[in-house]
Structure formats: C-alpha cells, structure tokens
C-alpha cells in the first residue's frame, strides 16, 4: 500500500475509529451507519500508519434527515451518492480485524453498530485482539476534573476546539485528547503532592476555556459523578456488544 509505514515488529497496531449514525426517533427503529473513519497507529510511538474515511448510504434514505442539527452534520444529500456498506465492508474489515481497537465509548456503541452492519449483509464481523475505550480509561484516571467525559467536554477542557461529529475529525480529536491527558498525568506523577492540588476538590472541577480576548483562563464548574469503567478489556467474539 502506497504511503504505508510498517510498525515495529512484535507490537500490535491500534486502530482508532469512529462511526456516525442516524438517531432513531421512534420505538423499534435502528441506528444506521452513515460514516466510518479510522486511523491506524503504532503503539510504540503513535505514528500514524494509515487513515481511511467514507460516507455510507443506508438502504433506506428516508431515515437520514434532510437537514442536520449540527454545523458539520451529515444530511440526506451528503450520502445520496455514497457507497452502501456492502461496498466498503472489505476495507473496513481489513482495517479492524486482528488489531487493537481504540475509540471513545466504542464498547457500548461503535462496536455494536459494526457488528450489526456486518450481520445485515450476512458476513461475520471483524474481531479485535483487544479494546481500549478512552471513555473508561479517562473516566478512571481523569474524570474528577473533566465533567461528563464526553469528547466535546474533554476537547473544551484542553482548548482543542469544537467537536465536529465527523468520523475522521473525531478520531483525530480523540488522539489529541489522549495525548494531552497522558502528558498532564505524567507531569502530576512527578510531583503529586504539589501538582494534584491544582485541581483536586471534592465539590468542584477546574476546566479551561478561552476568554473573549483569546487567552486561556480557568473556571470552576460543579462536578458530576462519573461511573467507573473497565480500562482495557480482552475480546472474544461472543462478548462484542455486551
């Protein structure tokens, strides 16, 4: 593959991915995948090895909104001429199968949607060798200061801009959030008795936002209790989507 950089031997590549879907508005209606985006990285140095994104046309176009409530949202016109899932299934399978899967809240959402999409075309789904859900990892390690732990909230905390809700953009934001969190936690581990005081409080969390003058400021917000999630989970075919 042109431009492909192999990872160092002996290390399992990680594929961070994200999907965009329709939002069911009545009982019994299912999610339909509208976009898939993924970035393959080497876990030793986080070098990007490969990226891929595609819009996906659902079998029933009427389930896609004519207008999106998001500024960069996916509309019916946007996917009208996109390939169906069966046309991109081989590419998605090859990207995901046999790699570590990474993403934000993928255990409860994206993994389930991938399994459903492959079942709809009568094919077995790709199988990961492990799953790293950044929602679980960051809730455990960073959640006391970052509110509801949605990607948009984490991006605001680190001043990374607004979440676009487009697959490849959200994957890149996910990677940037992870790098920022890792850096902060690494620095705090060097001087925990000093640096941890800057945010730790039983009733408040400290977040960062940009003032009207464009300077980075700090503000306090009411804390929300975040659930505890499993950091990294082994995977078996039967456990997908549970």
Image (cartoon, grey):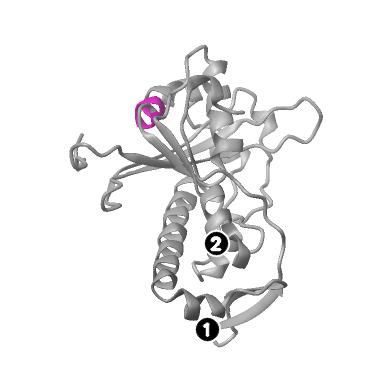
Q: Is residue 124 above or below residue 140?
A: above
Counting from the top left corner in percent of width and height, residue 226 is at 67, 55
Could you say whether the residue bearing mark 2 is in a helix, strand or loop? helix
Mark 2 → mark 1, Cα distance in angstroms: 25 Å
- Label drawn at residue 214: 1
Q: How many labels were placed on the picture?
A: 2
Q: Is residue 110 above or below residue 184?
A: above
Report crowding for label 2: few under 14, some 14 to 19, many 20 or more residues within 10 A (C-alpha): some
Counting from the top left corner in percent of width and height, residue 123 is at 48, 14
Say which of 102 and 94 sits in front: 102
Q: Quadrant of the N terminus?
A: top left
In the shown orientation, is residue 241 left or right of residue 49? right
Looking at the image, which residue is at 60% across and 74% down?
A: 200
Q: Earlier in the sequence, mark 2 or mark 1?
A: 2
Secondary structure, magenta segment, majority class: helix
Say which of 70 and 163 sits in front: 163
Could you say whether the residue bearing mark 1 is in a helix, strand or loop? loop
Counting from the top left corner in percent of width and height, residue 62 is at 69, 30
Which residues are drawn in magenta?
A: 91-96
Q: Where does label 2 land, which residue?
A: 142
Looking at the image, which residue is at 61% across and 75% down?
A: 206
Q: Of all residues shown, which one is farthest toward the top?
A: 122
Counting from the top left corner in percent of width and height, residue 21 is at 61, 37
Q: Is residue 93 magenta?
A: yes
Q: Is residue 237 above or below residue 38?
A: above
Say which of 235 and 17 sits in front: 235
In the shown orientation, is residue 166 left or right of residue 206? left
Q: Is residue 62 above or below residue 142?
A: above
């Amino acid at each position: 593959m042109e431009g492909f950089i192999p990872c160092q031997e002996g290390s399992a590549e990680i594929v961070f991915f994200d999907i965009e879907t329709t939002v069911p508005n009545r009982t019994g209606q299912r999610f339909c995948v509208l976009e898939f985006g993924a970035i393959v990285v080497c876990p030793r140095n986080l070098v990007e090895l490969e990226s891929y994104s595609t819009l996906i046309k659902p079998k029933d176009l009427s389930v896609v909104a004519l207008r999106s409530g998001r500024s960069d949202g996916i509309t019916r016109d946007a996917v009208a001429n996109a390939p169906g899932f069966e046309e991109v299934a081989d590419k998605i399978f090859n990207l995901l199968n046999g790699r570590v899967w990474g993403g934000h809240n993928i255990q409860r959402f994206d993994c389930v949607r991938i399994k459903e999409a492959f079942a709809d075309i009568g094919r077995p789904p790709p199988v990961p060798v492990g799953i790293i859900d950044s929602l679980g990892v960051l809730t455990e390690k960073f959640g006391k200061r970052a509110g509801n732990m949605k990607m948009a909230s984490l991006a605001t905390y680190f001043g990374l801009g607004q979440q676009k809700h487009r697959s490849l953009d959200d994957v890149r934001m996910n990677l940037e959030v992870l790098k920022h969190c890792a850096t902060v936690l690494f620095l705090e581990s060097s001087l925990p008795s000093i640096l941890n005081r800057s945010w730790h409080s039983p009733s408040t969390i400290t977040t960062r936002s940009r003032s009207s003058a464009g300077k980075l400021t700090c503000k306090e917000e009411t804390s929300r209790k975040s659930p505890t999630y499993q950091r990294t989970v082994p995977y078996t075919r039967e456990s997908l989507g549970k």
